[in-house]
Image: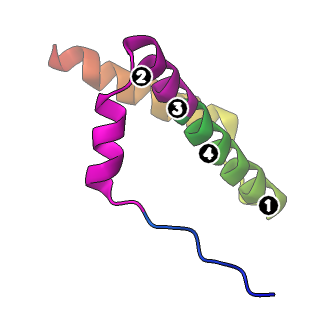
Amino acid sequence: MTQKEPEKTSVKEILKLVEQLSPENHEQLVEDMKLQWLRREVQKGIEHADRGELVDGVVVFAELKKRYQNKSDQK
C-alpha cells in the first residue's frame, strides 16, 4: 500500500486563509504559533543541557541586563 504525499499549499494560499479568519481566530492562531515556537526553543535548550552545553546563570543575567539597559538607553 503506497502512501499519498500530503498536498502542498503555497504561502499565498495560506495567507489568504489567514486573512479570512475572524479576529478571535486570528488571535488564537497567533497565540498557538507563539506557543509552538516557545516549545521548540525550550526543547532546544533541553537538548543543549543534555549535551552539557550550559551557560552559567550569572553570565546569562549579566548579558540580559546589559542588553535591556542598552535598549532603554536608546529610547
Image quadrant for the N terminus?
A: bottom right
- Neighbourhood count class around disc 4 (C-alpha, 10 Å): few under 14, some 14–19, many 20 upward: few
Which numbered disc, 3 or 1, marks the residue closer to the eye?
A: 3
Residue displayed at 27% across by 25% down: 70
Examine the residues drawn in magenta and state their main secondary structure.
helix
Say which of marks 4 and 3 sits in front.
3
Mark 4 and mark 1 lie on one chain; the one further toward the N terminus is 4
Q: Does residue 59 appear in this view?
A: no
Q: Position of residue 59 (x, y in %)?
A: 58, 38
Point out the tag, 3 or 1, that comes first from the N-terminus: 3
Which amino acid type corresponds to the residue marked 2 in the rendered image? His
Three-letter amino acid code of the residue under disc 1: Gly
Residue 28 horizontal side relative to residue 66, left or right: right
Instruction: Report the residue at 69% width, 49% height from top.
Output: 45
Gap between marks 2 and 3, in whole Å?
A: 12 Å
Nearer to us of marks 2 and 4 is: 2
Q: Position of residue 13 (x, y in %)?
A: 31, 50
Residue 48 occupies quadrant:
bottom right
Residue of label 2: 26
Which residue does the numbered mark 3 point to in the structure image?
34
Q: Nearer the viewer, residue 33 or 4?
A: 4
The picture quadrant where one finds residue 72 is top left
Kindly identify which residue carries mark 1. Answer: 52
Tell me if residue 74 is in the magenta stretch.
no
Magenta span: 9-32
| Mark nearer the N terminus (1 vs 2) | 2
Residue 41, disc: 4
Give the quarter of the figure containing the C terminus: top left
Indicate left or right for 21 with 60 as reference: left
